[in-house]
Amino acid sequence: MSAASVKKTPANAAKPVKKRVCKKAEKAETNAVDAAKPVKKRVCKKAEKAETNAVDAAKPAKKRACKKTTTEKKTAAATPKSASPSTLSPTERRRLADRVFATLAERYPNPSCALDHRSPFQLLVATILSAQCTDKRVNAVTPALFERFPTAQAFADAPVEAIEELIKSCGFYRAKAANISQASRAIVERFNGEVPATLEELVRLPGVGRKTANVVLGNAFGIASGFVVDTHVLRLSRKIGLSDEETPEKVERDLNELVPQNDWVDGSHRLIYLGREYCIARRPQCDACPLGAFCLKRP
């Protein structure tokens, strides 16, 4: 047989025949497989939110901190207590007081009232003016004030506005002018124009508290009615360790017990001198202070 007579076989005749897939059958098969899979539950967003809220409601509520309270706590933690207990026994504190005032008597042998005055009434007015004000400022104001109104009767008759105008630089001048005017009227009406010489009568006058009464009695009448506790004495008493109290009345009580009565007037002046010269509030000079060796130096 010749080569020409041999019939050529097509090249793709040896390849396997590709099975034709029916698209309809394939789709049916896919649907059957999907039907066999577990059905994914469709979640309703509204129901899911309600369920979450129910779970949150079941949890213990977290206490919301008050911003004000939190701020106060932080401030309290950052600010040291100004009157922390000194841990001194009564005997130790008395010894400390004896040493303090003996040292101050050597440093300031002849103390006197820093407020300029020529009469008990002038001292009363000057002391009222000295609240929240320096003695230097008061002494700058009182000469013109007392020249214009030399007596309690003159103050009582004067318009309050006229007093205000002369004491403006002392601060809180409206309240001070009102107190001076009312106290002057009371002195004229009840004491014939003279300042009373008892603590009980003085503290009944408008604008007169224990400190003012003690200043007037001690410096104008020579009567030691109580230790004078001004801002210097209040601060130094706690710092040195003479008292753990924070109010003038309670500090006065402690100092009255620690200091002999005949030293109440001069002792208060000496503590005031110390506060102005050495134990300055913002820049204390502890190295130079005569009490530096035994002062407790509390904040």
Image (spheres, grey):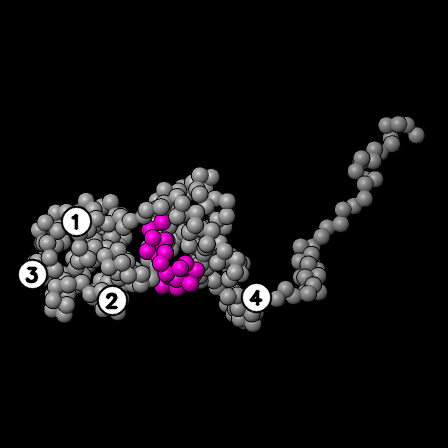
Label 2 or label 1, whichever comes before in sequence order: 1
Q: Secondary structure at mark 1?
A: helix
Q: Position of residue 261 (x, y in %)?
A: 37, 61
Residue 155 counted in the magenta span? no
Most common SS among magenta residues? helix
| Residue that carries the numbered disc 4 in the rendered image | 43
Mark 4 surroundings: few (<14), some (14-19) or many (≥20) residues within 10 A: few
Mark 2–mark 3 distance (CA, rounded to whole Å)? 25 Å
**What residue is shown at x 14% (from left), y 70% (from top)?**
190
**Towards the viewer: 268 or 111:** 111
> What residue is shown with label 2?
198
Q: Residue furthest right?
A: 1
Which residue has dot 3 on it? 157
Mark 2 neighbour density, 10 Å: few (under 14) some (14–19) many (20 or more): some
Instruction: Determine if residue 5 is in view.
Output: yes
Pick whichever of labels 4 and 3 is earlier in the sequence: 4
